Amino acid sequence: MPVVTYISHDGAINDIEVASGTSVMQGAVDNMIDGIVAECGGSCSCATCHCYVDEAWLDKVPAASEMEKDMLECVLEPEDNSRLSCQITVTDELDGLVVKLPPSQF
Amino acid sequence: MTEACCIVVGASHAGGQLAVSLRQQGWEGRILVIGDEPYLPYNRPPLSKTFLSGEKHIEDLLIRPEAQYEKVGIDFLLGQRVSAIDKKNKTVTLSKGESFAYDKLALTTGAIVRPLDIAGSELKGVLYLRDISDVEHIRQFIGKGKKAVIVGGGYIGLETAAMLRKLGLQVTVLEAAERILNRVTAPQVSEFYIRVHREEGVQLETGVDIQGFVGQDRVEQVQCGDGTVYPADLVIIGIGVIPNTELAEAAGLAVENGIKVNDFCQTSDPDIAAAGDCTNHFNGFYQRNLRLESVQNAMEQAKVAAATLCDKPIQYNALPWFWSDQYDIKLQIAGLSTDYDDLVIRGDHNDGRKFSAFYLKQGRVIAVDAINSPQDFMFGKQIITQKLLLDKTSLSAPGISLKDFLKK
């Protein structure tokens, strides 16, 4: 099973096995990682699952939709590597993916 | 001494979150969640969308898989109905007789559909849409070319209409009021949704007085007061929900259009908390009591309730928000528009599928309906909570970014 590394804002590191086909958001929610809120359950509606994709992985993660890009401009502290984690589907190619979590989702 | 036990009644969105939050807040004793459906807590919003269409299956709906609850020691008793709460002796009793003692209790019993009790409503094929079994039932009646009549032009009815069109059914929506979404949006937003549904081939009628359903052994027709008859292979009733407060009421808790809770999601009994659609709380921002039907409220209140039960109170303070997906349209709603005295439309609601409606009261934005306009929703939330006094003209000027209104 692919492993995703979640780095919380306080530096805590969680290596989590996330099944292929599920989202990076779901992996965090399943494992009760605090930094992801995911109020809308993954329908790209709330922008409370914001994360920063590690630079080394940017090329391998499929691009964001226009809707997601629009939402990302409004999150707290947006960066070029900002993504909504509900919109990133974990695959075998993403085994080892590293995402950092923002200080707040609001 | 035995370990402390917290019982959560209702394996709902709120119930699941509450149990998890109890662990996160440091509850060390037993956690037992009792639910009357046979499923672990699941996401309800996809029911009228991707679960109805068959794209998603039950395991895709689960908020968390079973193993994760096991890992943190959350027990479930599913397919069991709680029939009574004895708050004096601190026990709950199941309808099959078994009793459980609790130290703390949480009620996350949600809402139940408002029944339409008219002639023929007991006929086969007259259905509701609230839980998994409802949708499994609906699925037995759907198929390309079948005729579906939806009673009620609220969000559930409209989302269902959109999905049934996509599945190739002939769809009619009948609304009793003079316009759809009457209670929750401005006329301009209602007009927009009427236009879109008609563009998508839905027959949509307002001001309809439904007299009854007629059929031999299953529904065949919907009959209206003016004599109009709509043929139907299935009828889906979506006329709202009522809070599920029966247990709380029988137990002697304060109930008034929902289980009354304070800012800390505590009921009138300090050892009993409640969260989600079943509650009624005072909202500081709108300065009135609210009963909300939303995932966000269920999750936020669940966290607050868990903190209270762990004696680490945090005050509930959240701006309500909602969303609805229909066809290619994402509607995001920030705040509540009730009692607005002015409306500003950003964009064109008469053409295309992208605009926003800003609801103002005494010069301040109190709610935003953002249609395919996520930035208006996101910045709108901030404009509402910051209580900014805005110039109406610049609010509707397309060239001005909402970001510019926000305090730096």
Image (tube, rainbow, N blue to C red):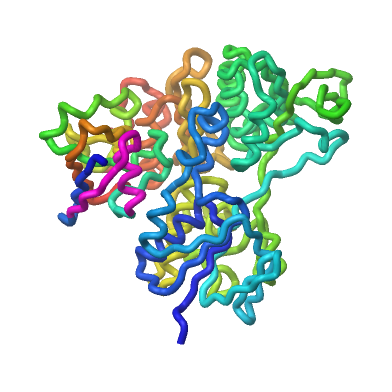
The percent coordinates of residue B171 (x first, y second) are: 67, 19
**Residue B212 seen in this snapshot:** yes
Q: Residue at x 85, y 30 (%)?
A: B212
**Vertical position of residue B39 compared to residue B302: above or below:** above
Residue range of the region highlighted in magenta in the rendering: A13-31
Quadrant of residue B372 within the rendered picture: top left
Residue B91 sits above or below residue B37 on the image: below
Q: Position of residue B341 (x, y in %)?
A: 56, 37
Q: Nearer the viewer, residue B289 or B299?
A: B299
Specify whether residue B370 is painted magenta. no
Seen from the viewer's position, the closer of residues B390 and B198 is: B198
Residue drawn 21% across the image and 52% down it: A14
Q: Is residue B25 left or right of residue B59?
A: left
Q: Residue at x 51, y 21 (%)?
A: B327
- Identify the residue shown where x is 39% and y is 41%: B381
Q: Nearer the viewer, residue B219 or A21?
A: A21
Q: Position of residue B274 (x, y in %)?
A: 55, 63
Could you tell me residue B75's position as x and y percent?
Answer: 48, 63
- Depth order, front residue of B22/B400: B22
